[in-house]
Amino acid sequence: MNFIKFCLLLFFIAYTYAITLKQLNREMICMVNKERGKRGIPYLAYSSQLASSAQKHSNYQYKKKKMTHSESSSSYSTPMKRIKKSGFKNPRACAENVAYNQKSISKVMKAWMNSKGHKNNILNKQYTHFGAGVKGLYWTQNFAKSPNGRPKNVKKCP
């Protein structure tokens, strides 16, 4: 394979991955916001920083083959540190849901909604923003409260 074909292949793989992460977040935030909407809780806005943080944490869990909320690096050791490092400015509060071995978005959401602590994170009224990531069967959701409050005109899902 020549260099140009190799570069095109890498570009295609990167492009496909980006679309997949974007689609994951679109589907996941719709499911989260549906659960919130059923209970009259304001919708969450998508945050690319939280999605990046969640994806990096899913990658970490996949690499370590271990579901965890902590990482060995002190600069990424807690969800709050990871969220700040991702560029989410001055979070007032945050939470993280992780899961392993769920085969689809609907199955992982069902598992989280059947778990009191995870469900509380999904339905917590103080959070304003959301992002998700997955690597293999390692799932992560990040929630945060922005110091700027809730964004206006959060898109509703169909």
Image (spheres, helix red, strand yellow):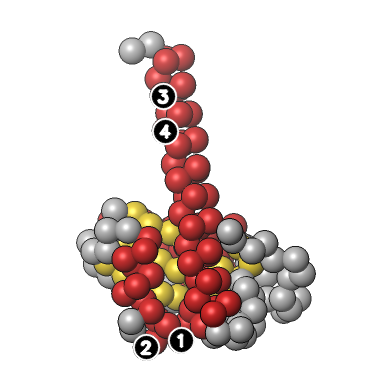
Foreground: disc 3 or disc 1:
1
Image location of residue 44, percent across then percent down = 61, 71
The three-letter code of the residue at mark 2 reads Lys
Real-space Cα separation, disc 1 to disc 4, in angstroms: 36 Å
Q: Do the residues labelled 1 and 4 touch (CB within 8 Å)?
A: no
Mark 2 or 3 closer to N-term? 3
The residue at which mark 2 appears reads as: 116
How many badges with numbers are in the image?
4
Q: Which of 80 and 72 is in front in this view?
A: 80
Q: How far apart are marks 1 and 2 (CA)?
A: 6 Å
Q: How far across and down, in percent of the image, does residue 48 sit? A: 59, 57
Mark 2 vs mark 3, foreground winner is 2
User: Where 28 falls versus 143 (above or below)?
Assistant: above
What residue do we see at 61% from left, 84% from top? 40
Instruction: Work out whether mark 1 precedes mark 4 in sequence or the reverse, and give the earlier one.
Output: 4
Q: Is mark 1 on a helix, strand or loop?
A: helix
Q: How far apart are marks 2 and 4 (CA)?
A: 38 Å
Asked whether residue 91 appears in the rendered view, the answer is: no
Mark 2 in CB contact with mark 4 (< 8 angstroms):
no
> What kind of element bears circle 4?
helix
Q: Residue 120 carries which label?
A: 1
Indicate which disc, 3 or 1, sits on the residue closer to the N terminus: 3
Residue designated by label 3: 9
**Left or right: 92 in relation to 5:** right
Q: Which residue is drawn at 75% across and 66% down?
A: 153
Q: How far apart are marks 2 and 3 (CA)?
A: 44 Å
Q: Is mark 2 on a helix, strand or loop?
A: helix
N-terminal label among 2 and 4: 4
> Residue 43: image x %, image y %?
62, 73
Seen at 50% across and 76% down, the residue is 35
* Label pair 1/2, CB-CB below 8 angstroms: yes
